[in-house]
Image: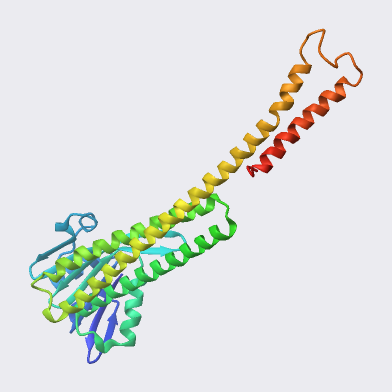
Amino acid sequence: MVRIFYKEGRLIKRENDVRELGKVKNLVWVDLQSPSPEEEEWVENKCNISFQTPQEIVEIESSSRFFEQNETINANSNFLRIDRDGYETYPVSFLLNHNVLFTYRRGDSKTFADVVKKMKVSPEGIQGGVDFMLLLLETRIEADADSLEGISRDISAISKDLTHEQKARQEVLIRISGLQEITMMLRETSIDKQRVLSGILRSQYFPEDRKEHLRIILKDISSLLEYTTFNFERLEYLQNTFMGLINLEQSQVIKIFTVVTIIFMPPTLIAGIFGMNYDHIPTTSHTWGFGLSLFLMVLSSLIVLWFFRRKRWI
């Protein structure tokens, strides 16, 4: 699928037929979403550009994430998709050529849909492909910030659960681990954008009057990174609290078994004495000897239990 956006007067209009690309004037943005080989080749031939291969787009080397060629800025960045099915990163390739933006991606993205909605609300703020690129980056960062706020709310909910229940549960640890993973991926994608935008900021082909806007976006990314660090610290604190509760529960269990073992040690000793195979053992020849042994066993247990209570060990 290829979406073509062009400026007509003060409005931004859209064309979905890639064959109309050569006829469109005042082109500002061409969005390629999982294009067919024919569509991709058509765009490359009509606009005199060249897209990277999917393997090149996902490369982590700096030379693959950002480079300039034939007055074209090429930048690749990873976006994070979070939905009910989970979360994953997907690469997005940006090409900025003579104030016309080309984006290349696989699959649908809420970020791009939100940009189109914003464009329809205030089209006068978009003069060219640079503005679309900045709007895309701003929208993506806003989505990341919303995700971090959602993670922060989940962290607060987990903290309240641990405070109220005072009991460790396995699902809590799973939730903490999941939040740590999402936060880590948000941090990775934010650092990736920071690195790419720093390269664009140094580019001679990027308009000077838009670089201040780019610096503001970089400051927003720095704020997100600080936010992720704060969430990491809170998650680490919750994890330590959870492990502390587990250790406390284990100590309580060990304490109970220890107390039970010590309580039954004197009765066991008495039972062992009365069970010795000797002819002359006190009370064995009397009818009340069995009752006396039971009484001594119970009394010894009660004395040990009373002693533990007095020492406040139980």
In the rendered image, which quarter is residue 194 located in?
A: bottom left
Q: Viewer-proximal residue, 274 or 117?
A: 274
Quarter of the image for the N terminus: give it: bottom left
Residue at the spot x=22%, y=92% of the render? 9
Q: Viewer-proximal residue, 279 or 180?
A: 279
Query: Can the viewer see residue 78?
Result: no
Q: Viewer-proximal residue, 159 or 10?
A: 159
Q: Viewer-proximal residue, 258 or 24?
A: 258
Quarter of the image for the C terminus: give it: top right
Residue 26: % across, % down: 18, 84
From the viewer's perspective, is 128 left or right of 204?
right
In the rendered image, which quarter is residue 290 located in?
A: top right
From the viewer's perspective, is 236 left or right of 11?
right
Residue at the spot x=39%, y=71% of the render? 146
Residue at the spot x=61%, y=40% of the render? 253
Check the image and report above or below for 109 versus 262: below
Q: How many marks?
A: 0
Residue at the spot x=64%, y=42% of the render? 311
Q: Residue furthest right?
A: 287
From the viewer's perspective, is 293 left or right of 252?
right
Residue 23: % across, % down: 19, 81
Which color mode does the image show?
rainbow
Query: Can the viewer see residue 81?
Result: yes
Residue 272: % across, % down: 74, 18
